[in-house]
Image (tube, grey):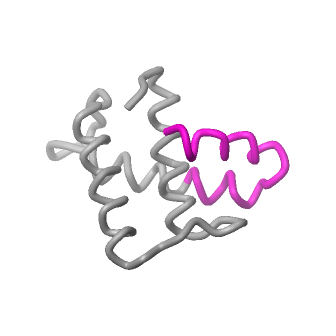
Amino acid sequence: MAAFTPRLAEFAFEPGFVAAVDQHAAMLRELLYAQGPELAPRPLDREELSDYALGFLDALTEIGWREPVGYDYAVTRLTAICWLVREQGRIV
């Protein structure tokens, strides 16, 4: 959270980044929160989101990923996680 929440400030200057983060947030909502035949969203589960973030960070560590100056898939995904947490008013 501490490393990627500041990226939310870039939204004011990077509309493409906003769109990309929004897409990632939508994918994460579907992946983590959809349930049942109607795929109705359920309340944010802090533990699931934390587990996903930790697993994603572990995978990035395994491949030797380093945060770029701009943004890539990983930065966008991590920023989307922060956005979802902030949207729910919770800190992971």
Identify the residue at image location x=68%, y=51%: 18
Residue 79 seen in the current view: yes
Tell me where residue 52 appears, x and y as whole percent: 29, 51
Tell me: residue 70, above or below residue 36.
below
Tell me where residue 89 appears, x and y as whole percent: 47, 20
Q: Nearer the viewer, residue 34 or 51?
A: 51
Left or right: 43 as drawn, with respect to 85: left
Tell me: residue 15, above or below residue 38.
below
User: Is residue 17 covered in magenta?
Assistant: yes
Identify the residue at image location x=34%, y=60%: 56
Residue 33 seen in the current view: no
In the displayed orientation, state which residue is furthest to the bottom.
63
Q: Which contiguous range is marked in magenta?
A: 1-22
Tell me where residue 28 appears, x and y as whole percent: 38, 51
Left or right: 52 as drawn, with respect to 70: left
The prevailing secondary structure element of the residues shown in magenta is helix
Q: Nearer the viewer, residue 36 or 61?
A: 61
Image quadrant containing the C terminus: top left
Tell me where residue 26 appears, x and y as whole percent: 45, 50
Q: Nearer the viewer, residue 21 or 68?
A: 68
In the displayed orientation, state which residue is furthest to the left.
36
User: Is residue 89 covered in magenta?
Assistant: no
Left or right: 12 as drawn, with respect to 8: right
Tell me: residue 77, above or below residue 49.
below
Q: Quadrant of residue 58?
A: bottom left
Identify the residue at image location x=61%, y=60%: 20
